[in-house]
Amino acid sequence: MYLKLKNIISDALCKELIEIYKSQNTVGKINKKVFEFRTNWNQGVDNKVKNFLDTTIVPLAKNQWQFRNYEYTNIKIREYPTGSFYEQHVDFYHPQPSKIYLSFSIVLNDAFQGGEFVLKSDQKFDIKKNDGIVFEGTDVHEVLKITSGYRMSLIGHLIADRK
């Protein structure tokens, strides 16, 4: 199960998050080519991101998956430069039956080619700027190779109690 999101984030918030990412000295590599910045942001920015998620992503996800009492984990901005990709993986390996584990990816820019999101090896999504996807973090997924430019995404996880 997944939820495709169209025009879920404003251009202004996309620009602000990219500027914050570029201004940080704490960007780290997660493999040879993909970079990320975790939200050890100041409280104002962190609250802005959480408010955005609370007012946009969460109501739509609650409607789809029927959950309560949620928390966010691993909210970060991820950069995929030309030639980079993220191979098949799952975000949660040992789920508890009483919990729902969701992941989200929201594209912040349009300065790239390639980088399609693939869910369960057979569902391919060409996610554009301001759009995103919410999916079960126990599902296999990947980001295909960026053929030119760089892709910036706001990603993270939501763990909630099943109703």
Image: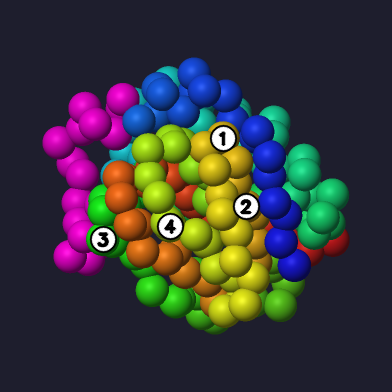
**Mark 4 or 3, nearer chain start:** 3
**Mark 1 or 4, nearer chain start:** 4
Foreground mark, 2 or 3, reads 3
**Mark 2 or 3, nearer chain start:** 3
How far apart are the two marked residues, 2 and 4, measured between alpha carbons? 14 Å
Instruction: Answer left or right for 117 relative to 98.
Output: left
- Give the total of numbered labels: 4
User: Residues in magenta?
Assistant: 19-35
Image quadrant assignment for residue 44: top left
The disc labelled 4 sits on which kind of residue?
Answer: Gly
Residue marked by disc 1: 130
Name the foreground residue: 69 vs 41.
41
Residue marked by disc 3: 83
Instruction: Answer left or right for 79 relative to 61.
Output: left
Mark 4 Cα-neighbour bin, 10 Å: few <14, some 14–19, many ≥20: many
How far apart are the two marked residues, 4 and 3, measured between alpha carbons? 9 Å
Foreground mark, 1 or 4, reads 4
